[in-house]
Image: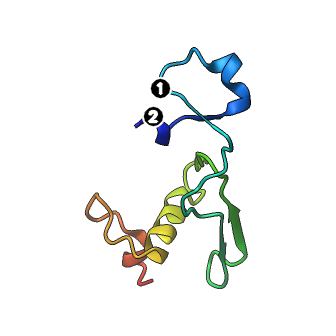
Amino acid sequence: MPETRVRFSAALKAQWGHVAAVKFVATVVPTWPRLKNIKIKGGFHDDIDVDFGPGLTAVIGGKGTGKSTLIEILRYVLHAGEPAVPGRSSLRSAGV
């Protein structure tokens, strides 16, 4: 399903048309629902405001900087259920 993976603007076809499995589209604006921002009010993480880009978003940081907590918050808010690895839910064990 290359049309869901790599999409270039049609203006780049002359330069990148030789690349296999690339779809060229009139606009690269996502047409599907996506998260744009998350704001946290109250509690330990009060006033956290994170913007997500329209493409790939990577959460990068050192040990203890909140990467897993951000993922847990998203999972909780989106009602995504339990994590794939049992016993890895920091929010559930914290009573949130």
Rate crowding at label 1 as few (under 14), some (14 to 19) or many (20 or more) other CA atoms within 10 Å: few
Disc number placed over residue 32 in the picture, else none: none
Q: Is residue 58 left or right of residue 92?
A: right
Q: Residue at x 68, y 44 (%)?
A: 27
Q: Is residue 22 left or right of residue 95?
A: right
| Outermost top residue | 18
Rate crowding at label 2 as few (under 14), some (14 to 19) or many (20 or more) other CA atoms within 10 Å: few
| Residue 65, horizontal then vertical, whole percent | 60, 56
Find numbered disc 2 in the image and state the secondary structure of the residue it sits on.
helix
Image quadrant where one finds the C terminus: bottom left
Q: Is residue 72 above or below residue 3?
A: below
Q: In which quarter of the image is residue 48?
A: bottom right
Q: Which of the colour schemes (rainbow, by chain, secondary structure, one colour) is used?
A: rainbow
Q: What residue type is labelled 1?
A: Ala
Q: Residue at x 25, y 63 (%)?
A: 86
Q: Quadrant of residue 43?
A: bottom right
Q: How far apart are marks 1 and 2 (CA)?
A: 5 Å
Q: Residue at x 71, y 68 (%)?
A: 49
| Residue 31, horizontal then vertical, whole percent | 58, 56
User: Which one is in front, 7 or 48?
Assistant: 7
Find numbered disc 1 in the image and state the secondary structure of the residue it sits on.
loop
| Residue 7, horizontal then vertical, whole percent | 58, 36
Mark 1, residue position: 21
Mark 1 or 2 closer to N-term?
Answer: 2
Q: Residue at x 61, y 53 (%)?
A: 30
User: Which one is in front, 57 or 46?
Assistant: 57
Disc number placed over residue 2 in the picture, else none: 2
Image quadrant where one finds the N terminus: top left
Q: Which amino acid does label 2 sit on?
A: Pro
| Outermost left residue | 86
* Marks 1,2: beta carbons within 8 A: yes
